[in-house]
Amino acid sequence: MTDLGEITMAGIESALENHGYIADEALCAALFVALSLERPLLVEGAAGVGKTQIAKTMAEVLDRPLVRLQCHVGIDETRAVYEWNYQKQLLAIQAYAGAADAEEILQSIFSETYLLERPLLRSIRSEQPVVLLIDELDKTDEEFEAFLLEMLAEYQITIPELGTIHAASRPFTVLTSNNARPLSEALRRRCAYAWLDYPDVEKEIAILRARFPKAEELLIRDVAEAIRALREKPRILKKPSISESIDWLAALQALGAVRLDRNAYAATVSAVLKNRADIEMVFAEENLCKTL
């Protein structure tokens, strides 16, 4: 599905499924709105529910390159947008010394030749449209979020030395948040929105079946139900993500298991729980694997 002029919700759902991503109606509707209105898509939810994978899969569906900005505490414009190649500028100043006046040197070194593109600038200057992933935006501060508003509203970036750079192509933008802090209403107004939760058992089965079409059906169901049980335990510090349920099934297949019995559970649960306290708590429970 590369022609945006023929987008339908059914087409989006089918295209995602063909690329191994099982989406519900609400997410397909949000994607349809975002694509149709050329708006960014803000996806919120707990860690591990498949938010980042939406952007990766949409890059495949739309047949576009993926440009990723991984957000973190303290990120600024030099990491996200652009910076100047200072070493190259210093060498140029030394080379130009005595050959030109100061104003001419200044104009020369603050030109395209010395500009280093970072993900945001790269995404709007690309001649070929891209999928832009701004991952874990909630880890940034309010100042950086405010900076994004110009780009998300107009798809343009202002560089003081060069002026305003308008988009050569409009990226399809996906922003993700784990709700570490509330995002501003100004940013939310500019975006289509989707909330992702952990899948229920049947959806988890569909996800696992899509990733492992040759796996035993009983083993897939065992894993999906065991994952649900682990997520429902209030004392589990780190709830298992979808990727960890995929890892669990892969580990079981590698061991040749056909059911998730007590021995298989004990041997492979560390593929899912990556915290010693969680593993010890599960093994200490009296009814561990009672129904498996």
Image (spheres, grey):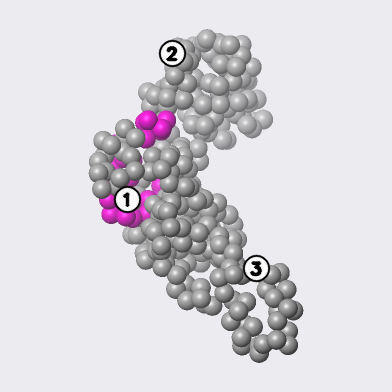
Q: Of the residues tagged 2 and 3, which is closer to the observer?
A: 3
The amino acid on which the numbered mark 3 sits, given as a three-letter code, is: Asn
Instruction: Specify which label sits upstream in the sequence, 2 or 1.
Output: 1
Please identify the residue farthest to the front as the structure is shown.
99
Q: Looking at the image, which is closer to me, 106 or 282?
A: 106
Q: Is residue 212 magenta?
A: no
Give residue 217's mark: 2
Q: Of the residues tagged 3 and 1, which is closer to the observer?
A: 3
Q: State the residue position of label 1.
A: 34
Under circle 1, the secondary element is helix
Q: Name the residue at 43% across, 58% down.
A: 127
Q: Which residues are magenta?
A: 16-44
Please identify the residue farthest to the bottom as the structure is shown.
101
- Marks 2 and 3 sit apart, C-alpha to C-alpha, by 55 Å
Give residue 85's mark: 3
The amino acid on which the numbered mark 1 sits, given as a three-letter code, is: Ala
Q: Could you tell me residue 289's position as x and y percent?
A: 54, 14
Q: Is residue 18 magenta?
A: yes
- Marks 3 and 1 sit apart, C-alpha to C-alpha, by 36 Å
Q: Could you tell me residue 155's position as x and y percent?
A: 40, 64
Instruction: Specify which label sits upstream in the sequence, 2 or 3.
Output: 3
Q: Could you tell me residue 169's position as x and y percent?
A: 39, 59
Classify 141 as above or below 94: above
Q: How dense is the environment of label 1, judged by Cα within 10 Å: few (below 14), some, or many (20 and up)?
A: many
